[in-house]
Amino acid sequence: MAENTIYKPLIVHSAVYKTEYTRKYENRIKWEKPDENKILSFIPGTIIGIQAKEGQKLKEGDVILILEAMKMHNKVQMPFDGKVVKIYVTKGEKIPKMHLMLEVERI
Amino acid sequence: MSLKRNILDLRKRKQEVQKGGGDEAIGKQIAMGKMTARARILSIVDEGSFHEYDLFVEHAGRDFDMEGKVLHGDGVIIGTGTIYGSPICVFAQDFTVAGGSLGLMHARKITKIMDHALKMRVPLVGINDSGGARIQEGVDSLAGYGEIFFRNTLASGVIPQISVILGPCAGGAVYSPALTDFVFVVENISKMFITGPSVIKTVLGEEISMEDLGGAKVHAELTGNAHFYAISEKECFEQIKKLITYIPWNNTQKAKIFPVKEPVSKYKIEDIVPADARLPYDIRDIIKSISDGSEFFEIMELFAPNIVIGFGRMNGETVGFVANQPKVLAGVLDCDSSDKAARFIRYCNAFNIPLITLEDLPGYLPGVDQEHAGVIRHGAKILYAYSEATVPKITVIIRKAYGGGYIAMNSRHLRADFVFAWPTAEIAVMGPEGAANIVFRKEIAEAEDPEAMRKQKIEEYKEKFANPYVAAARGYVDEVIEPQETRKILLHALQVSANKVDNRPAKKHGIPPF
């Protein structure tokens, strides 16, 4: 029994248990409600073209930019009729997964 | 030629081939901190017991100027030997010969020894140290891997299969170890991955070292692909030899019986567990307080440590322990711990090893990440494995046995043969804190001092339901026992279960939630 260990709390059904965490538990990703106005990369890759400008009004399905990943050219499309608010990436930029690429809004 | 000259010629040929890739390549292997394939085999088997076959096999490559090349033994050593007198079949890939790459004849040697192991019903130990498929042999290499995987599956549950990763093991090659029962890895030497760092960098732009991607620690702690982690090859070989003593040669036999040793007196069972069910302790101390000689051979020590699995002996015979670990994550069941326990339960069942379950858990781990990672699907594996198992199954409830966790941990309802409970056991649908909040919601909300009322109601619930007697009154618990009687009662339960017969409906196979 390791008397010197500092135990941490874990709540299960309102009871607070004293215990150790695993590295995996500590590194778990906290869930966040997806924001429909923020477009994140679904795969790491390179931005090879930006078709739209900030402030531009687009229809649902219009291409905003091209993300190249796994040798595929992925079109990143407007999810609804609306406006491009901000573009966070530049042409040629290499981005990781879940990277914020664009902000859009409905009009 | 005279007979003597023939013999001398044979010796010369053997000597030449046994050098594998030659002195320079051996020097490189040793400089990497690795032993040679032959030295590895000789370190595992009993002295003087190893016999090699197919020493003179040559590769079958005909393209890319391979025809003129000599690859001694085609980069793999196969043979038979003994470990503490028990026969085994073994193969070891020789990295000094064309990087241990797998061609047609290399694969044929491996499948030959696999077929032999299966036919003779003895364990198979495979030492992996290979750069992967031999590109020059093209589809023959792929065929070779496929033939190995098929045999791994055929032998699964019939003979013990042990994989030792002592070098790179990448791409398709990783699937043979993944199909076997136990995978051994060594710090700084083992590397396992499907796609390596260079491919990941090219296509995804993510930079990661081989060690961080698929090193020994990663597989022992994060992925659960490895069962045993060692810091040197020597330690790894000791682990393999120890494992062999705990398991039978095949699925029709029992493991070897050892002389009975009483547990060491320093593990005083009644002093280990705090009375407050919310406080931690190390469940391994309980295992050591009841196993022969306080010996416990833990498996997957670093992966999902909230559940503890491993072998010990009771009355000289091997048993499998499955125990919640209150010291880590309060001993909850989650995706990884369910996965870990379920596979071990199925191993024990396949190889006639009785199961002892020690229970102390608050339930399943709450969290979005768990739900989205499929805790339903993974959690179901443990229910499936316990329900399916027909070896003697004995449960000791130490403290908490709440809700779904109670059912999952080899409860009477999944056909435990014996369920014992300590007087500290709390068998209930959930802990007193949670239950009181729901059952007495109204009383608590309407009270003048809700906090005081909550505390009072928790105490009330604790008094009434947080004990083993409600379950004992239904016969779900067979006996409420004193902690210090645990070993004696387990020995008795194992003794009377020795001839257990439990017939199940005939089927091709079940459909477990893989």
Image: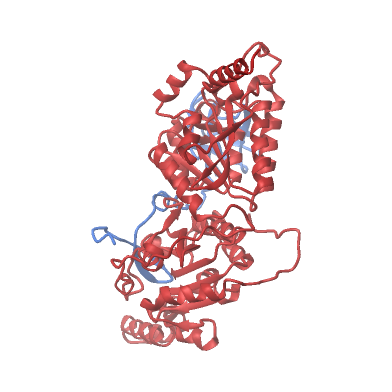
Chain colours: A blue, B red
The image quadrant of residue B295 is bottom left
**Relative to residue B422, is residue B10 depicted above or below?**
above
**Relative to residue B407, is residue B48 depicted above or below?**
above
Looking at the rendered image, the quarter that the C terminus of chain B falls into is: bottom right
- In this figure, what is the number of numbered marks? 0
Q: Is residue A101 visible?
A: no
Check the image and name the residue furthest to the left.
A4
The image quadrant of residue B457 is bottom left
**Relative to residue B177, is residue B63 depicted above or below?**
above
Seen in the image, is B73 located left or right of residue B462? right
**Relative to residue B464, is residue B336 depicted above or below?**
above
Q: Nearer the viewer, residue B504 or A99?
A: B504
Q: Is residue B73 visible?
A: yes
Q: Nearer the viewer, residue B181 or B21?
A: B21
User: Residue B244, how many percent across, how many down?
Assistant: 50, 50
User: Residue B216, how many percent across, how many down?
Assistant: 44, 39
User: Residue B276, how many percent across, how many down?
Assistant: 32, 75
Residue positioned 60% across, 74% down in the render: B415
Looking at the rendered image, the quarter that the N terminus of chain B falls into is: top right
User: Residue B144, how many percent across, how many down?
Assistant: 68, 32
Seen in the image, is A12 located left or right of residue B114? left
